[in-house]
Amino acid sequence: MDDLALLSLEAVTRAVRERRTSAEEVATACIARIEKLEPALNAFITVTADEMLAAARAVDRGERRGQVAGSVVALKDLFDTAGVRTTAGSRIFADRIPAEDAVAVARLRQEGAAFAGKTNLHEWAFGVTTQNPHFGPTRNPWDRERIPGGSSGGSAVALIAGFCHGALGSDTGGSIRIPASLCGVVGLKATYGRISVRGVVPLSWTLDHAGPMARGVRDVAVLYRTIAGYDALDPLSVDAPAEDPLPDIERGVKGLRVAVPRGHFFERCDAEVASLVRAAIDVLAREGALIEEVPFPPSQDLLDTQRTILSTDAAAFHKDRLRERPDEIGADVRARLSGGTLAEVRLATSTGIEYAEARHRRDELRREISAIFDAHDVMAVPATAIAAPPAEGEDAVAAAAKLTALTSPFNLTGLPAISLPCGFTRAGLPVGLQLAGGAWREAMVLRVARAYERATSWTERRPALA
């Protein structure tokens, strides 16, 4: 039974399609692992075992078909699900039951996915520890005394623990790629506007992305292909053709140009993390890629611009809750939201000026960084500057500053970026390689990620779970 839960998404859907196993057997295997291991990890806020089995049986009866039919997918509890509560990790939304699915969820459902449930997250997706004060902390399976990252921490843990074959996360400053890095899975943030965020509880309208997570690159590509595409009812969605990444995903990297930035990314890194990422870049070189160091904009400029936009957008969305129900918001998130409500401590006109300046600087930085991809196919950098830090004694706001420093530039610019495992520290903690590309070039990013994955074995490692 464990084998069915731990198979790749591609392998399990193929096995169901060829009738070598049934979708019900697959769902039962995932439920068994959840029942056995979930209490110690707390990856879920809501488990939907009965719905999962019903969806699987519909696949077996031939009533539901599609490119992910037979697989089990977990959903960050930020994505609306018809008839199933969507809490956004908040006590305020604890009993909120949407009437319809988020667009990404609807597309997965249409293609035959069975849903394991709604995964735990940092409250309101505004943090990177997934130490949720209302639904309990999610624990990193590699070391349960450490955080899994966030805000999509529950999705990453559900994957590496074998509770599902794929998952959805959201990413505003790194919330897919950070837990992917800290938990040893693969997570993709596509180009801004590529995947609809309609039906996803927002954090920052300017920076929010939805995206797929899985244990391997090809599975992420399958999920991406399923959920990507224009949504005319989403004002943030962009009507640009979405290339299917699978036909070229095995072409390798020979002759491709890989940019390695000087400054920002490696200067902020723990030495052991930097060494593992440098070794991963050497693997790409041995596979035939051409490596070139390039300049990169000043790091503080990037981080200050991102912080101003994110905090102001978040405070705007939560202004009524901050005014009417502040005591129902966790302390660390309340502090960050209050910090974004600049009108409380400065003139409202100053807030508007700062925000306008940040939006303008964002456009300048996006052009400057995008220019790197005029001459290069991808950029290779660390996903996080550190491996998973301890859960206790680590200030959540300080942890966010450390863990988002290397992912947030690609939210600010809206460029696609992926994290995949590239090694383990001496303490046995996973480290992520981050690959970024030019706008709308997800297929290229996935191709390079797959070439690295194929040349190594890091995505095959699993934590020992009792």
Image (cartoon, helix red, strand yellow):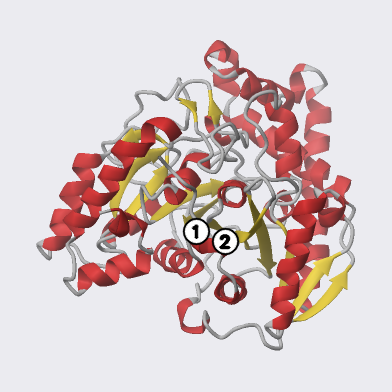
- Mark 1 residue crowding within 10 angstroms, few (<14) / some (14–19) / many (20+): many
Q: Please, what secondary structure does the residue beneath circle 1 have?
A: loop
One can see residue 74 in this view: yes
Taking the spot 45% from the left edge, 20% from the top edge, the residue there is 91
Q: Please, what secondary structure does the residue beneath circle 2 have?
A: loop
Give the label, 1 or 2, closer to the camera. Answer: 2
Residue type (three-letter) at the residue carrying disc 2? Ala
Q: Horizontally, is 433 left or right of 160 in the view?
A: right
Q: Quadrant of residue 77?
A: top left
One can see residue 98 in this view: no
For disc 2, the marked residue is 190
For disc 1, the marked residue is 195
Name the disc covering residue 153, or none. Answer: none
Camera-side residue: 234 or 208?
A: 208
Taking the spot 47% from the left edge, 40% from the top edge, the residue there is 154
Residue at the far bottom in the pictured view: 255
Q: Horizontally, is 252 left or right of 267 in the view?
A: left
